[in-house]
Amino acid sequence: MTYDSSAPLSLLPTTDMQLRALEAQVQALQVEAAHVRTLFQDAPHPAFLLNDQGRIVEVNTQGAALLGSIPALLLGRPLLNALVPDSQAALTSLLSRVLSGLSTHRREVCFAGPNSQPLDMVLVASLYVRADGVRLCHLSATDVTAFKAAHQSLLAITQGMEHELRRQTVRLKQLGDEFRDVTLAAERELGTTLTRAQNFLTLLERQTEPDDRLHSLSHVATAVQHTQGLLTSLKGYMQARMIRARLRPIDLNRVLREVLKELEPLQSDRVIQLSRVPLPTLQGDHQVFQIIFHEYLANALKFTRTRPQAQLRFLVKETEKDYWIGLEDNGVGFNMRQKEKAFELFGRLHPAELYEGAGVGLAVVRRLCERFGGRAWGEGKVEQGATFWFAWPKEPRGD
């Protein structure tokens, strides 16, 4: 039995019309399925279809590349094996929740990567039900490795800036405390000398005898000179504290030779025995080491000048974290109960009438050492000499 295909559909038998409509629907579904498959395969991100055992049912080109293989070789393999051990539980939990009918879920996991290079990925999972009723888990993966690396870098920079801010805050507080201490100490010292000068000037106004007036004038002149000396010492202190240091390897033997040459005037007409040992090369600033050696040597020469022969000896000790450099002398020494006073600004352990100086040098040494993470201290006994040390870290901190 034949039918005219050109006849109107309304004239064709009902079964034939239904068949043609069904074929058209099948073709449309096939086109749609092909379109969906193309979208899946050509997706810009890795995509997987997993069964309830976590095995790969479908994988697109990007997903295969992520696993360092081709799609045909990955079918049936468990995706779990591609993750680092710490991320496997997250994938198992994600798969279970999605296949149980819960909504779309996200998890961050780490893939081992083709070259065993960890790749941080965000998985977006949703339920996919095939036409035959089989429930599958659709996974879409987004590589966030670069984002996380940038985030970690930004976090490290932020933490570094916070650390530097805290360090600078502490530094500013220390400088503020130091400025206050220097101001108070200077006010006290200058007040003492200026008051003395004023007292002698007042006395001078009441004196009539020339000898008495000359005597008072000499005391005024001494007080003025002492005031000038204090101001000069303060200026030197501030200059030393404001040094723009640059860390580099410094040979302390060279520094010592330079300082000894500077101090030659203090050694004239004296018998001085200096015992040296090889000094280390330290990371630091040349000018800072010059100041430290100059103050220690000048201090030793000053307090040994009452001895027939000055005996000076350098000492070196090495610890795990720093070097100790010491200068031992056979001078007048000091009482250990006053050891901290020696390093105070304007601190003196001996009468100013016998030993000149404003009491600033050792304070400068301590401040400079502390600036780079070191320290300075002294040991001694009355009339049995003294040893002044400074400890310098092998890895000094920058200022």
Image (cartoon, rainbow, N blue to C red):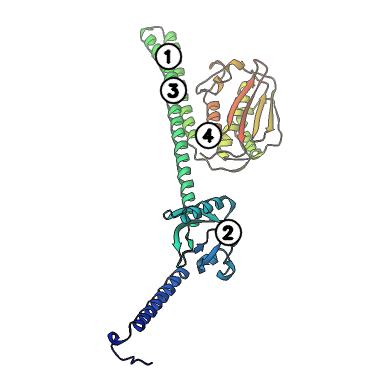
* Mark closer to the observer (3, 1): 3
Q: Tell me the kind of residue under disc 3.
A: Ala
- Residue 196 numbered tag: 1
Amino acid carrying label 1: it is Arg
**CB within 8 Å, label 3 to label 2:** no
State how many labels appear.
4
Which residue: 60% across, 32% down? 293
Looking at the image, tell me whether mark 4 or mark 3 is earlier in sequence order. Answer: 3
The residue indicated by pointer 4 is 371
Q: Nearer the viewer, mark 1 or mark 2?
A: 2
Look at the numbered discs 4 and 3 and tell me whether their residues touch, using CB distance below 8 Å.
no
Mark positioned earlier in the residue sequence (1 or 4): 1
User: Circle 2 — which element?
Assistant: helix
- Out of 320 and 242, give the one closest to the viewer: 320
Crowding at label 2, few (<14), some or many (≥20) Cα neighbours within 10 Å?
A: some
Instruction: Give the residue at mark 2.
Output: 82
**Residue type of the residue flagged with mark 4:** Arg
Please state, as top left, top right, bottom left or bottom right, where the N terminus lies in the image: bottom left
Q: What residue type is disc 2 on?
A: Ala
Q: Residues within 10 Å of mark 3 (few under 14, many from 20)?
A: some
The residue tagged with tag 1: helix, strand or loop? Answer: helix
Residue 61 picture location, percent across and down: 51, 69
